[in-house]
């Protein structure tokens, strides 16, 4: 799979072959209607079920199902995503519409987002998320650290007192907060107010200035990564924190191929 980007992007046929080899496209799939595995090629990249006659395209169930992106465009957008190029810059460089790039970036982020349920109900790109009305205060994610990896998960509203107990100055409460909680329930927190427009990033330490040393590397990594997304929309934050964890946990690997490996197991939501 360590094929050079130049070889991947010479033509559409080469890009298609690469995506098949990488597992992004699935050449042989059972019929989605009857479940039969008695299928055969139907021409023009389609497959036909020999039992019920249903046909489907090669993109079925993939990250690019129901998009108009070519295989080459997908590879190039994924490469820019891996390099943390903002969508507006990627769209300009690739001469692709911003909405198409933004939509694919959103889909890729959602592939990292296991365990996000209950934080926000994410809708299609370009629409506003629906936050639970009964949830006051900030949206909080707990960080659990194990050697060399982190796991980030949404926390219930009852954990709001973790924020209050740290005595954070009120002028800072409108920002996204990186909080080292030391001996609290989690090893660290990321919190933000979904109804605030301020998008600045602030690193906040507990009042007693203590810290939990193993998270030091993660904080530095998080600040560097988040600084590239200065204008990240609030509705994209829940998906982005999962992307942040994925990038940190795969920081010693080639990020482009790590993302392709993740997307090879992608299943298009119904």
Image (tube, rainbow, N blue to C red):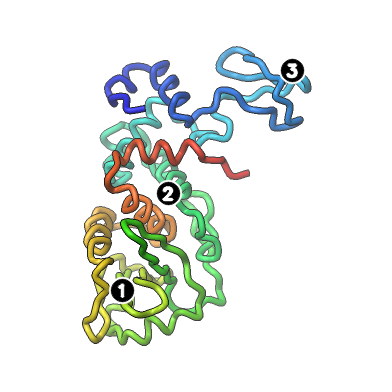
Q: Which dot, 2 or 3, sits closer to the camera? A: 3
Does the rendering let one see residue 88? yes
Q: Which dot, 2 or 1, sits closer to the camera? A: 1
Q: Nearer the viewer, residue 130 or 49?
A: 49
Q: Where 168 falls versus 216 (above or below)?
A: below
Q: Is 31 placed left or right of 207 in the picture? A: right
Q: Which residue in the structure is indicated by mark 1?
A: 179
Label 2 vs label 3: CA separation?
A: 36 Å
Q: Position of residue 62 (x, y in %)?
A: 53, 34
Q: Please tell me whether mark 3 sits on a helix, a strand or a loop.
A: loop
Q: Which residue in the structure is indicated by mark 3?
A: 50
Mark 1 and mark 3 residues within 8 Å of each other at the beta carbon: no
Q: Position of residue 261 (x, y in %)?
A: 42, 37
Q: Position of residue 195 (x, y in %)?
A: 42, 71
Q: Position of residue 192 (x, y in %)?
A: 38, 70
Q: Nearer the viewer, residue 2 or 239?
A: 2
Residue occupying the point 37% across, 37% down = 97
Q: Quadrant of residue 230?
A: bottom left
Q: Please tell me whether mark 2 sits on a helix, a strand or a loop.
A: helix
Labelled disc at residue 109:
2
Residue occupying the point 37% across, 60% down = 150
Mark 2 and mark 3 residues within 8 Å of each other at the beta carbon: no
> Badge 1 local density, few (<14 within 10 Å), some, or many (20+)?
many
Q: Where 247 falls versus 266 (above or below)?
A: below
Q: Closer to the N terminus: mark 1 or mark 3?
A: 3
Q: The N terminus is located in which quarter? A: top left
Q: Residue furthest front?
A: 147
> Badge 2 local density, few (<14 within 10 Å), some, or many (20+)?
many
Q: Closer to the N terminus: mark 2 or mark 3?
A: 3
Q: Please tell me whether mark 1 sits on a helix, a strand or a loop.
A: strand
């Amino acid at each position: 799979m360590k094929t050079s980007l130049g070889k991947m992007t010479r033509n559409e046929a080469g890009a298609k072959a690469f995506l098949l080899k990488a597992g992004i496209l699935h050449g042989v799939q059972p019929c989605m209607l009857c479940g039969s595995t008695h299928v055969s090629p139907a021409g023009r990249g389609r497959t036909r079920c020999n039992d019920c006659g249903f046909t489907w395209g090669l993109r079925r169930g993939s990250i690019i199902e129901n998009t108009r992106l070519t295989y080459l465009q997908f590879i190039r957008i994924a490469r820019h995503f891996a390099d943390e190029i903002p969508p507006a810059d990627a769209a300009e460089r690739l001469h692709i519409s911003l909405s198409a790039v933004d939509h694919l970036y959103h889909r890729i982020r959602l592939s990292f987002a296991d365990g996000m349920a209950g934080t926000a109900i994410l809708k299609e790109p370009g629409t506003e998320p629906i936050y639970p009305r009964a949830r006051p205060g900030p949206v909080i994610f707990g960080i659990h650290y194990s050697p060399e990896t982190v796991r980030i998960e949404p926390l219930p509203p009852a954990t709001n007192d973790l924020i209050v107990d740290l005595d954070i100055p009120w002028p800072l409460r409108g920002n996204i907060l990186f909080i080292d909680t030391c001996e609290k329930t989690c090893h660290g927190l990321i919190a933000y107010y979904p109804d605030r427009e301020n998008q600045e990033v602030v690193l906040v330490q507990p009042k007693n200035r203590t810290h939990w040393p193993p998270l030091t590397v993660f904080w530095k990594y998080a600040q560097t990564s988040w600084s590239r997304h200065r204008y990240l929309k609030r509705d994209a934050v829940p998906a982005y924190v999962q992307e942040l964890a994925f990038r940190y946990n795969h920081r010693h690997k080639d990020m482009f191929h790590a993302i392709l490996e993740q997307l090879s197991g992608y299943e298009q939501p119904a």
